[in-house]
Amino acid sequence: MKLWQKNGTDTAEVDRFTVGRDREMDLYLAEADVLGSLAHTRMLASIGLLAEAELVDVQRELKAIYKEMTAGNFRIEEDVEDIHSQVELLLTRRIGDTGKKIHSGRSRNDQVLVDLRIYLRREIYEIVGRVERLFRTLQRLAEQHKDVLMPGYTHLQIAMPSSFGLWFGAFAEGLADDLTMMEAAYRVCNRNPLGSAAGYGSSFPLDREMTTELLGFDTMAYNVVYAQMGRGKTERVLAQAMSAVAATLNKLATDNCLFLSQNFAFIAYPPELTTGSSIMPHKKNPDVWELMRSKCNRLLSLPNEISMMTTNLPTGYFRDLQLLKEVLFPAIQTLKECVEMADYMLRHIEVKTDILADPKYDYLFSVEVVNRLVLNGVPFREAYRQVGLEIENGTYRPQREVHHTHAGSIGNLCLDRVDALMDSVLKRFDFERFIRAEEELTR
């Protein structure tokens, strides 16, 4: 079944090529498609395109289909082109010709647009929830290990004293910034394109304000041409926000791989969270973090991949856009899995507390020695030269006390302020609006 087909002719080769994996990808959009139709048909009734009795039948069966979807009892039949066709087909089987009326005033173009935005805002909600949990874990670890010193590096050379509190806290604050980008993606995503039809509006007196309210969108995408132009842009903006989270996870994974190695030996994990070697019995490999690092590298390429698929497309819809689902939907699942696994691993991390007792870290404290000379009245450049000469001639003796008190330093992590920063970001999402709207539509 194809919504655009006028007769029964079809070419199997063309069908296989053009449909591709779209049925598989459309299953991600199934619930969103029904939500869009629930709102659209209520609007159609309000402008006289559906009788009240017809609306009752449509709403009842759409809600039944929605329940089948949430229970996992839904599929797109082999000879059905997409999710939109499948839902309309099921309605027509159950309530007759009334089911054929639900497409009035819309095109598959704006139908898939609204499906995407409903689906993507749900996925953003899930990503944000998982990132928040990881953030809380990192903040807890930062507080727990705030007094445990570790080496800080520049150029992978021993540089200055750091702490596990600083290390964990740095990733936590990074996630707060990442969610600021995700909030921008959510704002772009949470605008209603329904009513733009094929990209040029409709001669029906559609009430777009009504569907915007029913679906819990912030606003509508007002200009119908721009609503269609949002296809590709919405995905790209979300991909950029996802890549920000992935970049933070990537660095976290890389550090864990380094710190778990014998040459560093800063941290440990239970044996069941590492893997062994087929011939070397001593090995405890950080496979989880290595795979996460690679997966996040792939996510970092996502914005560019989407950009390359949509670059140089003129205004209007093109079938090229169908393939965006194949790169974005699996990537979303990958990011969620990576965030969840990072949280799981960190909840089992063991921190070594005596790292700096090793004499090889003596030079970490050279800046501390310089600063103490400056505090005693020695000009900085002279103090620097003096300590440098002591290091060269072997008379340097470290003073292992660290006195960092300024905001954001070892002795003043500002964890409460970072908590407040994250809470402020989370509050701006206002997910409750769309959650409440979806619950009311399906009640």
Image: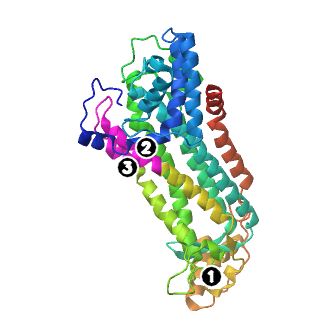
Q: CA distance from mark 1 to mark 3?
A: 42 Å
Main SS of residues in magenta: helix
- Relative to 204, is 443 above or below? below
Tell me if 204 is positioned left or right of 375 in this view: left
Range of residues picked out in magenta: 306-330
Give how far across and how far down residue 443 sits, in percent. Answer: 66, 27
Which residue matches tag 1? 361
* Residue drawn where x is 39% and y is 18% of the image: 201
Instruction: Residue lying at the far top in this picture: please name it.
Output: 48
| Within-10-Å neighbours for mark 1: few <14, some 14–19, many 20+ | some
Number of the label disc, if any, that sits on residue 304: 3
- Foreground: 352 or 1? 1
* Residue drawn where x is 62% and y is 37% of the image: 429
Residue 210 shows in this picture: no
- Foreground: 361 or 133? 133
Q: Inspect the image, locate mark 1, and give the three-letter code of the amino acid beneath it.
A: Tyr
Which residue matches tag 2? 25
Give how far across and how far down residue 231 sits, in percent. Answer: 40, 34
